[in-house]
Amino acid sequence: MAESQKGYLQNNEIIPINTRINIENETFIFLRYINQGTFSNSYEIEDLFSNRKFAIKIHRIGHIYTDQGINEVKILENLKNNPYIVKMFAYFSFRNQFCIVQELLSNNLYDAIKSMDFRGFGHYYVKVIGRQLLEALQYLKSKGIVHSDLKPENICLENNPGRKLRVKLIDFGSSFLESGTGTCCVQSRFYRSPESIFGMKITTEADLWSFGCILYELIMGMPLFPGGDNYEQVLRYVKLIGMPSMNILRTGLKIDDFFHRSSSKWFLDLNIAGQKADYYLLYCNDTDFKSYLTPKKLEREIHHRTPSILDNCYLIDVLFRILKMEPLDRIPINKLLQHSYFANDESKIPMNNTQRLRPIRRKIVRPSSHMRPRHFNFDTI
């Protein structure tokens, strides 16, 4: 790495357009500000020698931000040459801040969903995007790497207008090796796996849970588990897929935050208006105040969403094979790639293909800015 230009940046300081970076034999010029993330700011830059355009992430000042950037570099160096993972070209220090130069991508999936007025996409798009994400996750698994923050904001469209649709995973700053001993609460809340909430070892299966949540959001346009906190997340999980396994109830380091045992039975605790409610009451009450999804409700909504009965049935089967409380009960990625839902190659379908979409019947508050942190602000597709 090389130190460039004198002077230092203040945290959150926006670099002016036309600012130049001289790194060894290359000169980059800042073209536009893209977004502000949790650990860094992103810009579009151009190499004045080759006229190629890139994205640059400039991390904030401080060891925690620099360490995040260094971790991402190490992960990306181990994930080279995969078509569904963002490419890294360089890293260096600029005005005392750690920088990573990556390929310039287009909108992220959250912005794409937003551009559809949160109506979601047809099965063609869900299949294409889903299969590519599975290929990426299979590659991560082969390397023993957990992304740990898989969500629509961290999946971007390739910047190739007129060519076939391709998505790429980005933001590996929070990624880690599966061989570690991580049991912390990782992942963004809407896509957070049960094992992350319950304080269990985090493996690549946690990313698979997030993938299942994203599949639902792609077809429906809304998050599957839009909980306001971990307690509500757990309630939504239980309502849809039932109680955790005895293994989770006995070994989860944080299980006592959500469940209690009475005699030989386990109960789910949730503070509602100062009162405790247990799992049996909540699960049997199909008209509770939040109208949480039950298995039948999820099936009805997907069937109401599109007229393709066969694709609907395949997708429902995929979701319930993925959304298991016990990580090892989730269908393996290689089996998912062979599933009938992903069997057809739809990779040549352009993004402007006409879709048959119906409005969502379920009433749900659209995620607000404080509920859904955004990491990019690209133009709508």
Image (spheres, grey):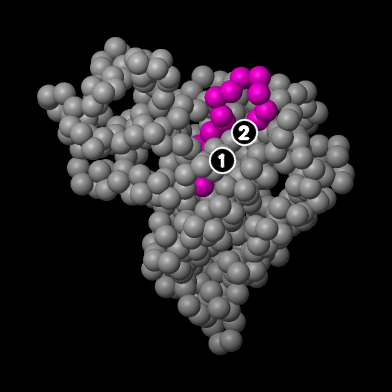
Q: Which mark is residue 84?
A: 1
Q: Position of residue 51 (x, y in %)?
A: 41, 15
Q: Residue under circle 2?
A: 166
Report helix, strand or loop for mark 1. loop
Image position of 83 (left or right of 256): right
Earlier residue among tags 2 and 1: 1
Report helix, strand or loop for mark 2. loop
Quarter holding the C terminus is top right
Residue at 12%, 24% in the rendered image: 6
Q: Position of residue 35 (x, y in %)?
A: 39, 27
Tell me the amino acid under the disc marked 2: Arg
Image position of 377 (left or right of 137): left
Q: Position of residue 85 (x, y in %)?
A: 51, 41
Task: State whether the magenta stretch is mostly helix, strand or loop.
Answer: loop
Residue at 26%, 29% in the rendered image: 12
Image position of 155 (left or right of 20): right
Neighbourhood count class around disc 2 (C-alpha, 10 Å): few under 14, some 14–19, many 20 upward: many
Residue 109 in sight in this render: no
- The span picked out in magenta is 150-166
Neighbourhood count class around disc 1 (C-alpha, 10 Å): few under 14, some 14–19, many 20 upward: many
Q: How many marks?
A: 2
Location of residue 108 with respect to 184 vertically, above or below: above
